[in-house]
Image (spheres, rainbow, N blue to C red):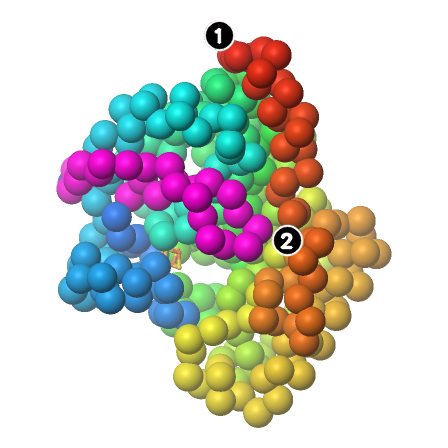
């Protein structure tokens, strides 16, 4: 069945997320239906854009996304450090090939102007991304992974891709030489799932970067006795593991007693290189 679509007035926006820069959400809603809860769904409900969880589960594609990009790229190009896809939907939504197809076109369009993409999904990556003549080689591809327990996944993110398939698709990109990362956020407290953080970390030790963060807006988790101590201990484990395995890391603000402002620039490092490349060489792909 063909997805519903909407028309938007703008697409690129400056994100408020501490480690992000510009962002694109080219779909309204998300079929993954996360019950952490999903912050994006909460906001859309609050603003009256959607009425219910059921409505959120029926994603609508932004039909004019590529036309908007053609207009907005020349306007923002020299300010953009990188573009994040996505914070309020999923760019490789599981079992929604139309979403993945549009995402690929967006990545290609941005890369054509030497704008790097930082991508995050709970779906499966398209293998075609290894074609670096088409998509560029400096994008960073991530998956959200907060557990390896399938029963927990069924409860908390019922319609996303199975953990194993998700990891396999990320490892494929890694093996082909692309940069990969993990968003381990929102990480659940032990009253939601009993698990070994070190085991999860070891499973994805091939990645270049890990971002770890606590679970917010979840009553049972907030009521977990020793919540603060638990997250501080987890953050220490992640930092130690990353240092030992030469993985870059960032602990999301509010997870530790004291926030680390330096590591929030985890995706920015190559901005100066990117910018000089964009000025000297308007397009690598023409
Ligand atoms: S994948 Fe992201 S946007 Fe989609 S429902 Fe889950 S938390 Fe929300």
Res. 286 mark? 1
* Residue 178 versus residue 27 in the image, above or below: above
Image quadrant in which the N terminus is located: top left
Q: In which quarter of the image is residue 46?
A: bottom left
* Residue 68 versus residue 124 in the image, above or below: above
For label 2, being within 8 Å of ligand 1 is answered no
Q: Is mark 2 on a helix, strand or loop?
A: helix
Which residue shows up at 51% across the image and 66% down it?
A: 186
Task: Indicate which disc, 1 or 2, sits on the residue closer to the N terminus.
Answer: 2
Question: Residue 2's spot in the image, x, y percent?
Answer: 16, 38
Which residue is at the far top? 286
Q: Magenta segment range?
A: 2-27
**Crowdedness of circle 1 by 10 Å Cα count: few (<14), some, many (20+)?**
few
Residue tagged 2? 264
Tell me if I can see residue 117 in this picture. Answer: no
Which residue shows up at 57% across the image and 92% down it?
A: 225
Which residue shows up at 56% across the image and 35% down it?
A: 81
Question: Residue 40's spot in the image, x, y percent?
Answer: 34, 59
Instruction: Indicate whether residue 205 is drawn in magenta.
Output: no
Looking at this view, is 77 or 205 the one in front? 77
Q: In this view, does 154 lie to the left or right of 145?
A: left
Q: Mark 1 or mark 2: which is in front?
A: 2
Q: Main secondary structure of the magenta part?
A: loop
Looking at this view, is 279 or 126 the one in front? 279
Which residue shows up at 48% across the image and 18% down it?
A: 112
Q: Quadrant of residue 35?
A: bottom left
């Amino acid at each position: 069945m063909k997805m519903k679509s909407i028309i938007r007035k703008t697409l690129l926006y400056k994100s408020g997320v501490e480690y992000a820069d510009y962002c694109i959400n080219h779909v309204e809603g998300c079929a993954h239906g996360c019950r952490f809860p999903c912050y994006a769904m909460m906001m859309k409900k609050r603003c009256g854009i959607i009425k219910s969880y059921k409505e959120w589960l029926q994603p609508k594609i932004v039909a004019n996304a590529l036309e908007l990009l053609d207009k907005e790229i020349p306007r923002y190009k020299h300010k953009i450090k990188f573009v994040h896809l996505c914070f309020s939907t999923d760019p490789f939504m599981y079992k929604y090939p139309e979403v993945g197809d549009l995402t690929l076109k967006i990545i290609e369009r941005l890369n054509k102007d030497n704008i790097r993409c930082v991508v995050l999904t709970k779906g499966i990556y398209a293998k075609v991304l290894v074609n670096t003549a088409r998509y560029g080689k400096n994008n960073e591809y991530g998956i959200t992974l907060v557990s390896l327990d399938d029963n927990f996944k069924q409860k908390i993110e019922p319609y996303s891709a199975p953990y194993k398939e998700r990891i396999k698709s990320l490892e494929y990109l890694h093996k082909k030489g692309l940069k990969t990362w993990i968003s381990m956020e929102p990480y659940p407290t032990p009253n939601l799932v009993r698990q070994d953080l070190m085991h999860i970390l070891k499973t994805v030790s091939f990645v270049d970067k890990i971002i770890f963060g606590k679970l917010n807006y979840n009553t049972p988790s907030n009521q977990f006795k020793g919540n603060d101590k638990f997250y501080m201990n987890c953050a220490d484990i992640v930092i130690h593991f990353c240092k030992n395995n030469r993985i870059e890391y960032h602990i999301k603000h509010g997870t530790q007693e004291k926030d680390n402002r330096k590591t929030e620039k985890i995706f920015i490092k190559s901005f100066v290189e990117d910018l000089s490349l964009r000025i000297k060489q308007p397009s690598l792909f023409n």
